[in-house]
Image (cartoon, grey):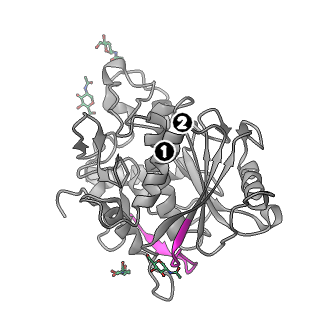
């Protein structure tokens, strides 16, 4: 009974906060969006479904469907655009993450095992999403070519600049390229911090010349870490006694927080690159995709305000997945085979 109630609640929540045209990700809304009359300081009332630990295993309301469009079945090449100021260490953390996705030599629980759930999704010919994800070319946009406040359309302008640059333009790779546009911590993007931490979509031929699947993820380190880098920073609306952030595994709260958002967008871009393949819900402009279904769940028992069972590194940092030379915290994704959210650090399956 309780779990059904909360499952409905989650869907109301998802449809209220999903934004049109693009898939948007956020950890959860500020309490004021849920209950404007909420003036008590009981932490659990800050979340719409904090008592639901069942969601991880609850499937009756999830109707993920395949809508006949393509998925990324060819070897996936991730081309990164670094927009604004990025230091070497930040770039290294993110490159190591991307390079880890296909690396089967990493010890359990590994990112390649996490990606195996994504590989379960197929196109209409039965072709699975590729297991091969490699880091492609990179482009620096150090001088903020489109300013420090970007709209969804100007993000496409940034991509156009990167593929048409006179020196070392990014390759044009509509079928297997995944363009990852990452904005530095002093860049504001439309709806960043108020309703999204990242999203994926595809470029318009009229603007960019090609239909290229891309994802944008912002570094929230300065603007809203409590919103987009949870649980390495805490939302300001929590009472101080509940604001104990976890230590991030790579020593950079903004970038460690981006990793899970990047993983989220890569999983969804691979399974729904043109917004006509795998998603739940009736309306393709409000798709609920394979990572949306598992927002905020990083381990067994996760749901609501609880991350689920995580792992402790020797230095006291919190993580759930191993990569090459590093540890990461990455949310789980929905398995349409199991009918629940899963990840390689699951304790019970
Ligand atoms: C919040 O907590 C404080 C101290 O724990 C208490 O004095 C206060 O009455 C509480 N406020 C509400 C609205 O419950
Ligand atoms: C806080 O909320 C929970 C769940 O609704 C309830 O069981 C608990 O008694 C509440 N605690 C306080 C101090 O109001
Ligand atoms: C491809 O997808 C099918 C259906 O989900 C699954 O049974 C199979 O194991 C997948 N193959 C690989 C190599 O992941
Ligand atoms: C795809 O990647 C695999 C290695 O993961 C490689 O063996 C294969 O040749 C690649 N295929 C193409 C078409 O590039």
- Report the side of 87 relative to 81 (left or right): left
Q: Is residue 209 magenta?
A: no
- Asked whether residue 59 is in view, the answer is no
The structure residue drawn at horizontal position 77% and vertical position 43%, both measured from the top left corner, is 145
Question: Within the image, what quadrant is residue 68 found in?
Answer: bottom right
Q: Name the residue under label 1.
A: 258
Q: Position of residue 251 (x, y in %)?
A: 39, 34
Q: Give the range drawn in magenta.
A: 62-77
Q: Residue at x 49, y 30 (%)?
A: 32
Q: Could you classify mark 2 by the number of other residues whose Cα lies within 10 Å: few (under 14), some (14-19), or many (20 or more)?
A: many
Rendered image quadrant of residue 50: top left
Q: Are marks 2 and 1 in contact (CB under 8 Å)?
A: yes
Q: In which quarter of the image is ligand 1?
A: top left
Write down the residue under mark 2. Answer: 220
Q: Which of 285 and 110 is in front in this view?
A: 110
Q: In this view, does 29 lie to the left or right of 305?
A: right
Residue 77 visible? The answer is yes
- Residue located 50% across and 70% down the image: 271
* Callout 1 secondary element: helix
Q: Label 2 vs label 1: CA separation?
A: 8 Å
At 72% from the left and 59% from the top, the residue drawn is 168
């Amino acid at each position: 009974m309780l779990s059904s109630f909360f499952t409905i609640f989650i869907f109301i929540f998802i449809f209220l906060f999903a934004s049109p045209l693009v898939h948007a990700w956020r950890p959860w809304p500020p309490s004021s969006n849920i209950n404007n009359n909420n003036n008590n300081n009981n932490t659990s009332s800050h979340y719409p479904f904090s008592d639901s630990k069942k969601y991880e295993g609850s499937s009756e309301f999830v109707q993920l469907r395949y809508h006949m469009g393509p998925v990324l079945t060819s070897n996936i090449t991730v081309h990164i655009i670094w927009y604004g100021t990025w230091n070497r260490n930040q770039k290294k953390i993110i490159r190591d993450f991307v390079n880890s996705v296909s690396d089967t030599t990493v010890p359990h629980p590994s990112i390649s095992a996490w990606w195996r759930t994504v590989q379960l999704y197929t196109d209409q010919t039965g072709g699975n999403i590729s297991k091969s994800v490699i880091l492609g070319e990179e482009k620096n946009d150090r001088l903020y070519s489109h300013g420090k406040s970007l709209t969804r359309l100007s993000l496409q302008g940034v991509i156009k600049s990167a593929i048409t640059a006179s020196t070392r333009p990014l390759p044009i790779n509509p079928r297997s390229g995944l363009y990852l546009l990452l904005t530095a911590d002093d860049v504001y993007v439309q709806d960043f911090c108020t309703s999204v931490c990242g999203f994926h979509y595809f470029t318009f031929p009229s603007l960019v010349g090609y239909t290229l699947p891309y994802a944008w993820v912002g570094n929230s380190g300065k603007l809203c870490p409590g919103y987009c880098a949870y649980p390495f920073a805490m939302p300001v609306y929590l009472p101080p006694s509940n604001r104990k952030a976890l230590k991030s595994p790579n020593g950079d709260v903004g970038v460690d927080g981006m990793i899970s958002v990047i993983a989220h967008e890569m999983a969804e871009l691979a399974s729904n690159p043109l917004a006509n393949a795998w998603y739940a819900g009736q309306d393709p402009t409000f798709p609920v995709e394979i990572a949306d279904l598992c927002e905020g769940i990083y381990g067994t028992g996760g749901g609501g305000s609880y991350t689920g069972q995580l792992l402790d590194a020797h230095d006291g940092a919190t993580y759930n997945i191993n990569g090459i030379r590093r540890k990461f915290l990455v949310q789980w994704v929905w398995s349409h085979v199991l009918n629940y959210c899963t990840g390689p650090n699951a304790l019970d399956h």
